[in-house]
Image: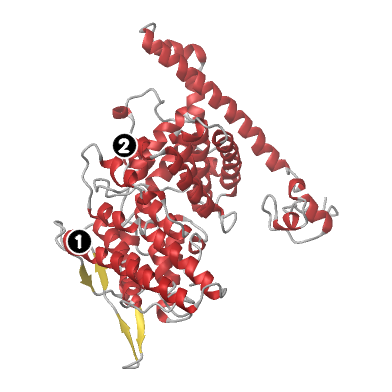
Amino acid sequence: MSGQRKRRSIYSCLSCHQRKTKCDRAKPCNTCVRLGIASGCEYGMSSQDREFIQKSEVIERLRQRHRQLEKQLRELRAAGGASSQRLIAANGCQDTMSFTSSAPSSVSSAEDTPSPSAIIPFKPISPISMQNPEVQPLQNSQAEGQFDSERLVQQFLAEFCPRQASIQSFPSNLLLEASKMRRTSPPLEYTLDAAALTWGGRRFKNRNLEIAGWNQYQRALQLVRQAIQDPESSLSLDILVSILFFVIIECLKHSSKSSARSHLFGALTLLQHRTAYRHRIDLERSIYVELRLYWVNVAIWERQPTFLADEEWLTVPWMDGQQKDILQHLLDIAVHIPAYVAQVNDVTQQSVAGILSSAEINSEQIKLMKKATELDQRLEEWKRVHADPYPPGSPREVIGTSDDNFPLFRYYDSSTKTIVQLSNIVYPDMLSATALVYYWTYRLILTLRIPGVDCPQRSQPYFFARQICRSMKYHILVGSGLFSCQAIFALRLASNMFPPDSLESLFTDEMWHMFEQRFGFQGLKELYPPILGYV
């Protein structure tokens, strides 16, 4: 036995392995794409891979059986016939349920369905470990592959569900409601399982979970592609929710630099096809209203006029009498920024290319200044009318210390040649924190100097970027899940304003690291590409 050589595992695709070329282990890999043989990019299977495929086939058969039994149970309850327990026992459902899931079936009422917080209590994040203490490590049996998929889903939801669930205009129950839909939607079921497995694999450093999550993700992508090709199925709510979960999976997996961003743009396009009238009530309304900040920010970065500024999208989701809070009033102004950014982008490109004459550049410059000034004035009015008199209170400043292991925001004052440390901004709640951070973010966009177009500064962009950074501690330590992720767009734009290797730039780098460490994400900074010529 000692004379036998141990066979090395092959991780590259078969084509790269045969050519002995570098492989990035994507499918298809960049080398195969560059050589024009993307369709032939295949990977060999190890005995471990074949074992996972066999297990996934067993799980799929059990899921199908599960759905059949749920259907029979619904029919039995509707008919008021024999006891459901006899039907379960006769079909062997108890063994099946104990293997696949311990959650209530989709026929259970909402009152009977426990929330993730009831199953796994959620405590504030430790500023030192940046980990959720209620997410327990896998046991030995789970590490060997015999994991409880339902418990893993519940832990995943507990990690990403906000703690301040009572605040309006935040995705407080969105993931929980989506988890209830998955029992009747194969695409969403595969997607949520893939997200939970991928998250669990990274959190617990378990490669088996990551492989299982990747297999589920591929199935979910295939089902969603098939649904999108059908005009009726493409408008289904579970397809839109699945694509939103794809973004989380890509932030965890980071299979390519543009994959998460592509899913965001795809979800925005699907939202437009669904029309505003499909988002008037219930979960459909929550998908639009509670995630409206994400929709607007994606539209800004797309640099094209957006349908979100149309009258129906500004009014229809609130036509049943719901009141807009301070964040929604801010977004009513922000939806007009994408058209301004698109105009700036066009003028910049034409100016650099020499297409416009000096007179035409001056004319376009006047239009840009007028539009930016109008939007800036509307933002200042929003602060006076909605933010300053906010009933829960106003933000306050707190001096940071190094004792809590959170980075301190510092900058070099060239006039005094000293390093100055600024206080952190603390808010009465997350709604106020998010609204004000994006008030500064949107004003920052309007005050950026545009390459090729000599637009004068109307304010100090550095001040706005600094205010955003001073708010990061509150967002990371107080916010949870999607609460914290809402600050990513603002941090990306603020980080553009600081010189490389400066104290401010080093601070933003630490913030990216803390966001990624908090959720196990990868490449968050690449989620949004450079805007308006800034890197």
Residue 197 as seen in the image, left or right of residue 106: right
Q: Determine which residue is flagged by label 1.
A: 387
Whole-percent x and y of residue 479?
A: 32, 56
**Can residue 466 be spotted in the picture?**
yes
* The one of 457 and 354 positioned closer to us in this rendering: 354
Whole-percent x and y of residue 195?
A: 50, 44
Name the image quarter holding residue 411: bottom left
* The one of 342 and 525 positioned closer to us in this rendering: 342
Whole-percent x and y of residue 369?
A: 35, 72
The residue positioned farthest toward the top in the image shown? 81
Which of the labelled discs sits on residue 344, or is there none?
none
Q: How many labels does the image show?
A: 2
User: Callout 1: 10 Å neighbours few (<14), some, many (20+)?
Assistant: many
Q: What residue type is labelled 2?
A: Arg
Q: Which of marks 1 and 2 is nearer the N terminus?
A: 2
Whole-percent x and y of residue 463?
A: 31, 76
For label 1, the SS is helix
Mark 1 vs mark 2: give the one in front: 2
Q: In this view, does 38 lie above or below 450?
A: above
**Can residue 133 be spotted in the picture?**
no
Q: Determine which residue is flagged by label 2.
A: 280
* The one of 483 and 5 positioned closer to us in this rendering: 483
Residue at image x 41%, y 11%?
A: 76
* The one of 435 and 25 positioned closer to us in this rendering: 435
Q: In this view, does 264 lie above or below 444?
A: above
Q: Are marks 1 and 2 in contact (CB under 8 Å)?
A: no
Q: What residue type is labelled 1?
A: Ala
